[in-house]
């Protein structure tokens, strides 16, 4: 049975989320990918994919709010934060 391109994309994004260079990011992005990716629209998946291209050290500081993130990543970071805490902001 062949999987669709959408299913392949979600599988690839899940793997990239769980196999980061930093364990902390595995533990943040992995569960988000498992529970949240299937609910995202294509533009949001594109934004998430761009976020995964970022350096883990920077990404960790942005997700935790320890450093200001680039403007174009803010909506996706808010989505990830909301999935972790159940709250936005």
Image (spheres, rainbow, N blue to C red):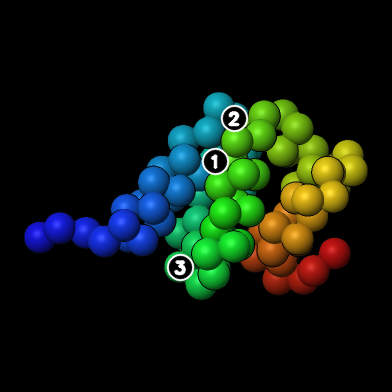
Q: CA distance from mark 1 to mark 2?
A: 7 Å
Image mark count: 3
Q: Residues within 10 Å of mark 1 (few under 14, many from 20)?
A: some
Residue 52 x/y as whole percent: 59, 41
Foreground: disc 2 or disc 3: 3
Q: Are marks 2 and 3 in contact (CB under 8 Å)?
A: no
Packing grade of label 2 (10 A; few <14, some 14-19, many >=20) is: few
At x 40% / y 56%, what residue is drawn? 10
Q: Position of residue 14 (x, y in %)?
A: 43, 50
> Residue 11: image x %, image y %?
36, 52
Q: Residue at x 60, y 62 (%)?
A: 44
**Element assignment for label 1:** helix
40, 86: nearer the viewer: 40
Q: Secondary structure at mark 2?
A: loop
Determine which residue is flagged by label 1.
26
Image quadrant where one finds the N terminus:
bottom left
To which residue does mark 2 refer? Answer: 22
Instruction: Name the residue: 53% across, 33% down.
Output: 20
Labels 1 and 2 touching (C-beta < 8 A):
yes
The image shows residue 61, relative to residue 8, as above or below, that is: above
Left or right of residue 31, residue 79 in this image = right
């Amino acid at each position: 049975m062949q999987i669709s391109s959408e299913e392949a994309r979600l599988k690839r994004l899940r793997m990239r989320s769980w196999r980061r260079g930093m364990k902390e990011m595995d533990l943040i992005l992995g569960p988000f990918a498992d529970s949240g990716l299937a609910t995202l629209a294509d533009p949001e998946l594109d934004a998430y994919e761009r976020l995964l291209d970022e350096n883990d050290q920077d990404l960790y500081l942005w997700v935790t709010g320890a450093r200001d993130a680039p403007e174009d990543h803010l909506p996706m970071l808010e989505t990830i934060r909301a999935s972790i805490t159940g709250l936005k902001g």
